[in-house]
Image (spheres, rainbow, N blue to C red):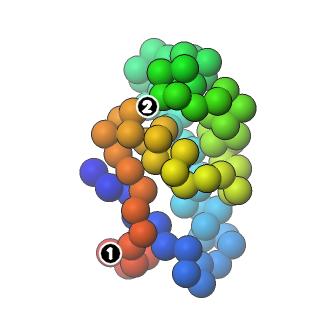
Amino acid sequence: MILKYSLDSVPERVYSICMNTIAEFIKQNRKEAGLTQEEFAMRSGLGLRFVRELEQGKETVRMDKVNQALAMFGMKAVPGRMDE
């Protein structure tokens, strides 16, 4: 499954909703896998601070790191039209 996003002229509110969707997906799947934030950070090769900020829906995260987190669940975010 691929999560699609497009940053070209996306209203801030829509971008915020996208990041919150990703944040909830990561948090839910991490918990279902029985991982703490610390364990998830170590297994994914990400910093604990990044994982915490991602799960809180921080809007200024690096997409390469978001994809690194999503890869733990066989997912990735890619550019795409919002209506696809």
User: Is residue 24 or residue 38 the one in the foreground?
Assistant: 38
Q: Which amino acid does label 1 sit on?
A: Glu
| Residue 34 image point, x, y percent | 45, 15
| Residue 45 image point, x, y percent | 52, 28
Residue 52 showing in the rendered view = no
**Image point (54%, 33%), residue name:** 27
31 is higher (above) or lower (below) than 82: above
Residue 12 showing in the rendered view = yes
Label of residue 29 in the image: 2
Horizontally, is 39 left or right of 33 in the view? right
Q: What element carries label 2?
A: helix
**Image point (52%, 51%), residue name:** 64
Disc 1: which residue: 84
**Image point (54%, 20%), residue name:** 42
**Image point (70%, 56%), residue name:** 60
Q: Which of marks 2 and 1 is nearer the N terminus?
A: 2
